[in-house]
Amino acid sequence: MNRIKRFFGMVVFVLIMAAALAGITGMTINNHVVNSQKGNILGAITDTKDDFLQTEYQDMKKINADCIMILGAGIIDAETPSPMLKDRLDTGILLYQNGVAPKILLTGDNGTEEHNEIHVMLNYVKNAGVPESDIFCDHAGFSTYDSMYRAKSIFEVESCIVVTQTYHEYRALYIAEKLNLTAKGIAADQERYSGQPVRELREVLARIKDFGKCIVKPAALLGGEAIPISGSGIPSHGE
């Protein structure tokens, strides 16, 4: 009986140590991803937009970016972006209007008719007055990794300004760097978004996952013919 207890005690000890090691490794990876990209986030669009455009704007212009990449973030219905996505779109449009880059690349999940982020994003940007030829749509941006991979492989982007919220910027920029895509981030935070604590926890796990993917560098889930960012974006609209 004592031998059985000692055996199970050893098993529990090993499991605890393994869990602790996994936790330490995971947090080390998370911190590495975040700390390695802090310097690549140029700033955030806030209520003081004029001040922003006089400061971070100058740094953005030095990049000579091919495009402003706006990452998807969910929709409310077939015509309405979520509050988080709306802030990303407004930020990207502001950057485009101020000459930060000549094109906008919209990338998001268009996996089903019921959840078509690209449809909502495209209409929103067109309604803001951006010429259709300057808008590119990646309908297969099913993940942050796929969005970055396809930006380079399908749209032939070499440099870009990535627009998303701060918590997400670190991973997006890390993936871009590992895929040899020159990228700087502009955070789109405008408020404290509902459900953010859960989102932050999921992001830690996503950073760990994509850290591994960036070592292996698998192809994106979907490929396709090239649609160079240097040309017209209309063929990418799919509408």
Image (cartoon, rainbow, N blue to C red):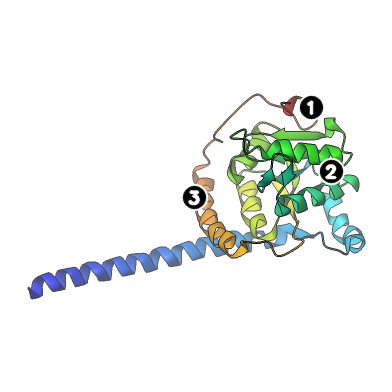
* Residue 179 visible in the displayed image: yes
Marks 3/1: CA–CA distance: 35 Å
Residues at marks 2 and 1 touching, judged by CB atoms closer than 8 Å: no
Residues at marks 3 and 1 touching, judged by CB atoms closer than 8 Å: no
In-image side of 103 versus 73 (left or right): right
Residue 101 image label? 2
Q: Amino acid at mark 1?
A: Ile
Which sits earlier in the primary sequence, circle 3 or circle 2?
2
Marks 3/2: CA–CA distance: 31 Å
In-image side of 45 versus 146 (left or right): right
Estimate the x, y position of residue 13 in percent, counting from the top left. 26, 71
Q: Which residue is mark 1?
A: 234
Residues at marks 3 and 2 touching, judged by CB atoms closer than 8 Å: no
Q: Amino acid at mark 2?
A: Ala
Residue at horizontal 61 percent and vertical 48 percent from the top: 175
Residue at horizontal 89 percent and vertical 39 percent from the top: 129
In-image side of 212 versus 189 (left or right): left
Q: Which residue is mark 3?
A: 212
Q: Nearer the viewer, mark 2 or mark 1?
A: 1
Q: Amino acid at mark 3?
A: Gly
Crowding at mark 2 (Cα within 10 Å: few <14, some 14-19, many 20+): many
Residue 93 image label? none
Which sits earlier in the primary sequence, circle 2 or circle 1?
2
